[in-house]
Image: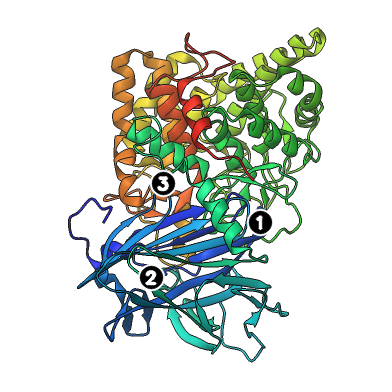
Amino acid sequence: MNQTTPSPTFDDLIDQEWLAVNHIGGYASSTPIGLNTRKYHGLLVASMLPPVRRMVILSRVEETVHREGWPYALSCNEYPDTIHPEGHRLLKAFDAYPYPRWAYQAEGWTLQKELRLLRGHNTVCLTYTLLASDKPIELELRPLFALRIIHELMYQWNGQLDALPAGKNQYRIPPTSHTPEVFFAHEGDFDPQGHWYLNTIYRREQERGYGGLEDLWMPGTARWTIQPGQSVHFVCSTEPIDLPRVLHKLDHQYAVASSPPGLSHNTELDSLIRAADQFVAFGRDHSTTLLSGYPWAAVSVRESLIAFPGLLLVSGRLNEARSFLQTLAGQLRNGLLPSCFPLAAGPLRYESADTSLWFVHAVYQYLRYGGDESFVLRTLWPALEQIIESHLAGTDLGIRIAANGLLSSHHAGVPSTWMNACVGDWVVTPRYGQPIELNALWYNALCIMSELAARLGRTTLAERLTGHARQLHEAFNARFWNEAAGCCYDVIDEQGRDVSVRPNQLLAMSLPFAVLELNRHEAVLRKITDELLTPFGLRSLSPRDHAYQGRYGGDLLSRDRAYHQGSAYPWLLGPYITATLRLNGRSAATRKQAGQILAPLLQSMPGRFGLIPELFDGDAPHHPGGLVASAISTAELFRAYAEDILDLNPDHPSFNSTHRIPVATIILQNIPNLP
């Protein structure tokens, strides 16, 4: 097993999760033993309207090997009061890279199972190879279908779900008012005797306070006789299947990824490269989308923009970066960008005060990494100018500029910052008024736009924006500094100043144009290190605060109370390290010291098969929570590790805008193009 402990227990194995993606929003995910603990697990979770509208199509399969009259179950599932079958007892090895692979062994035989997703298609292929045996075996496979939206559950019903022949070795499950059209194909025999498998339990859903009991439909049994050394295949898809063509495409797709020993001869960098690539997806029009996370997140535009440098720029993917920025520029409304693209492809919501300011930051980072300046100044400039002028004039969400230049946002019932947890009408962390990071981003945007205006020859505009930035800088340092605490206030509003010690003040130090005076950086970093730093991220609130919640778990109410009231976020280590090196310099010694901060997360990645979660408990032992795989966590870890720890950044003298940094060459050679 690809584990950190020699003999993992059953509970250890079901605590781990693997992930494979198809780069159009779909994925496959489960535990190493194949026992689905979440309703979001499945071997084919398709994106029906790429990159959104995810549906669990093929939930799992039940496999049985027959040899000399004896049955050997390979699969594993949880039903009320029992685990059945217990195929995990035959599992001898599992690895998730370059794709999930299992090795099962009993007396006299060894069988390998592989799962591969076809890039750019909602298609999964399961391959079984008899590695060792002195005689043939019989393999039976029963596919279990969920056929529902990822947030829902399937229950037995009386609709017609027969599997109909659809060509050689191919079957079709016709669509109904409840379910999509699905195809599956294989080279074996098929017995179309369908029935329901009742009462599958998803224990993680029950722990989270949701329904966790589901019925799955099984259309029939596929059977093969497998000779030693022979491979057989089962393919499931949302489109008709040409089996030889699919297998050929998969072999070509994974040819590079399967080449040992690695990408860069740096284990941590290799893991981050692979992890970052999982969040880059493409729509039907081939536009680039950055997914927020797996398995359930909608596409948060704010998180996509924060993740943008780590997912696309550090890896030198400037074409995708350009496509991503151009797509977002067309979504502006009154100077604001949507807060998210819903998974169900519903109407866009504009409920984020800072997202459009993150867009300005992303454009600047794109230029910093050698992006097309003419594209920015000709194509993106109108969007950038709209953002600035809308904020100066006042726009939606109660966004207004005060007389002293500070930026405020207040729209009742709408949490417009990244700390946006809600329970019904209760906004857990409202932060109405003048949040510190909103003003840090506003100052950064003003400075960026002044610089770009100067490049365009718009001297009057550049001077006007510089004037606004100076006024903001003066007001910020006068109003946000908490001398008694040696750090910044979190929010300023009509009632006063919020003394909560939170990590948002980091952005006043880590952005390219830092609004907080440099002579205050050391005190703030000392405060953050003392009260917020954990081995796996920064707490969202100091444990010394009466509102602190150190455990993220339980039902929805319990989790949302802790979401931004103490939970530790890995992504915040990115700006923390950047701010630290800005203060202490970028010597080899300081970068090595900063690398020790990231070490616990980097060392934990193999045990989570390269996945970095959304958050951890604020209290030790810091159990993971939230999204199993988070784009923002992965991207900021990748960016900080490459830019700051390895010093692979465009400010380094060795940077070349044509060839870019060494890691870019490594990555570009090892990420296949979309078919």
Q: Position of residue 379 (x, y in %)?
A: 80, 26
Q: Position of residue 626 (x, y in %)?
A: 45, 55
- Residue 423 shows in the view: no
Mark 1 touching mark 2, by CB under 8 A?
no
Structural distance between the alpha carbons of marks 1 and 2? 25 Å
Q: Which residue is mark 3?
A: 612
Packing grade of label 1 (10 A; few <14, some 14-19, many >=20) is: many
Q: Out of 260 and 391, give the one closest to the viewer.
A: 260
Q: Secondary structure at mark 1?
A: strand
Q: Are marks 3 and 1 in contact (CB under 8 Å)?
A: no
Residue at the disc numbered 1: 52
For the residues labelled 2 and 3, say whether their Cβ atoms are less than 8 Å apart.
Answer: no
State whether residue 307 appears in this view.
Answer: yes
Q: What's the residue type where badge 1 is placed?
A: Val
According to the picture, the residue beneath numbered tag 2 turns out to be: 35
Secondary structure of residue under mark 3: loop
> With respect to residue 381, does 326 lie above or below?
below
Amino acid type at circle 3 is Ile
Q: Position of residue 608 (x, y in %)?
A: 35, 51
